[in-house]
């Protein structure tokens, strides 16, 4: 944790460098600070994964866009951050706002050209069981006071 | 919101027109009414995305089906609707039932021919952060009393 | 239900037999027992689906790994079990532990060779609507005292 999962209408794979967007979002997450100005998320726990949907339908399927502008192709991206329990509400907001600002900036030029909806939501996991096993974390925790 | 996500065993892509199913489900969602007989969901917020799983295992992997009928290939489709907070329990039920009736009708002939499980669930999002940004919504809200 | 969904960085498809892993995990789920030593999950309701992410970014994107060992490719697998309400906390733990032990054993040799994070979480669904329709369940319930 935290996991940022992008689910989106698959035509966007032809219009965005999604791998680059994942890396930019991961960088943004590394920059989020908690209330003590420490990193809100351990670097080794940051994961961004992006899933294009091969099949989809958005809104009315395109009729209103066709009527309004001759463009019937709607796109949509949903960014869902799931983080563990225990962070303050202000840290949660800060994380959501950082991701929002990042994705809005990255997709601003696309949004000027096409129909696009972007939704960012942050969930705090309510899991009843949790197990983490990683040999990535130690790369970032050696010699650090805070694990 | 609302988002309807279909996750399913990938062999179904060879048996169903999944894009058409997405559009039929979106149409169904546009028809759901709230307790005041108004649309339960804003048209511009309706999204249906379908994800075939390339790898999967269902039940016992096929043994019981092979024994019973010589058919060992099980399929499964999970339809998860996530909607925002604030709708009444009866509206939530109405949405779930509408999706259920739609998908059961659409897949009835398939279910008569093969092993298939269909599960529909509705979740009310408990997000701690929510940001929506869209140029699709305005196509449906101009001149409407209710945004 | 229960549904076990694997989401993972897509490069792992080149390194693991993911279909076999799904089947091994389903077998593990069939073996989980409740507090009365009965199967915790109905066989006909067990589903494992695995989704490789075609686009992703993990941790710092590879810099620390490159510095430490010359290997910059991080992998990650997230296993999320969603089960229905009503099972005891000890059964929930038993299910999570069984899945954890299974995936750790299956991926142990891979973890010895590459950077990899594995997270297992169990969620108890808080759905407000639930409908199940299946012709797989009857394969396993005929003649059984417990549906």
Image (cartoon, coloured by chain):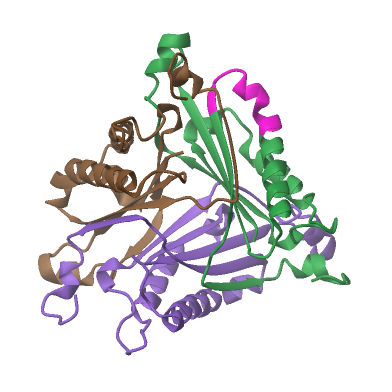
Chain colours: A brown, B purple, C green
Q: Nearer the viewer, residue A126 or B56?
A: A126
Q: Residue B49: where, in percent of width, then height?
A: 40, 59
| Vertical placement of residue B28 versus A117, above or below | below
- For the C terminus of chain C, the image quarter is bottom right
Q: Is residue C142 magenta?
A: no
Q: Nearer the viewer, residue A112 or A79?
A: A79
At 54% from the left and 26% from the top, the residue drawn is C116
Residue B64 relative to residue B122: left or right: right
At 60% from the left and 70% from the top, the residue drawn is B110
Q: Is residue C113 magenta?
A: yes
Q: How many marks?
A: 0
Q: Residue C141: where, in percent of width, then height?
A: 81, 69
| Vertical placement of residue A21 versus B21, above or below | above
Q: On the image, which quarter does residue A34 sit in?
A: top left
Q: On the image, which quarter does residue C144 sit in?
A: bottom right
Q: Main structural element of the magenta stretch: helix, strand or loop?
A: helix
Q: Residue C109: where, in percent of width, then height?
A: 66, 22
Image: magenta residue range: C104-116
Q: Residue B51: where, in percent of width, then height?
A: 47, 54
Query: Is residue B103 among what the camera can see?
Result: yes
Query: Is residue B16 among what the camera can see?
Result: no
Residue A31 relative to residue C139: left or right: left
At 33% from the left and 89% from the top, the residue drawn is B37
Q: Nearer the viewer, residue A64 or B110?
A: A64
| Vertical placement of residue C81 versus B109, above or below | above
- For the N terminus of chain C, the image quarter is bottom right
């Amino acid at each position: 944790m935290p996991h940022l999962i992008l689910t989106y209408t698959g035509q966007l794979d032809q219009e965005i460098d999604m791998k680059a967007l994942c890396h930019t979002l991961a960088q943004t997450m590394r920059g989020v600070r908690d209330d003590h100005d420490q990193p809100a998320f351990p670097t080794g726990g940051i994961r961004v994964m992006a899933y294009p949907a091969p099949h989809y339908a958005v809104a009315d399927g395109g009729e209103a866009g066709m009527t309004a502008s001759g463009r019937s192709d709607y796109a949509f991206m949903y960014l869902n951050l799931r983080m563990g329990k225990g962070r303050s509400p202000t840290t949660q907001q800060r994380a959501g706002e950082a991701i929002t600002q990042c994705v809005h900036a990255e997709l601003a030029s696309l949004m000027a050209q096409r129909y696009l909806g972007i939704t960012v939501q942050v969930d705090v996991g309510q899991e009843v069981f949790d197990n983490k096993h990683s040999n990535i974390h130690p790369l970032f925790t050696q010699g650090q006071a805070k694990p």
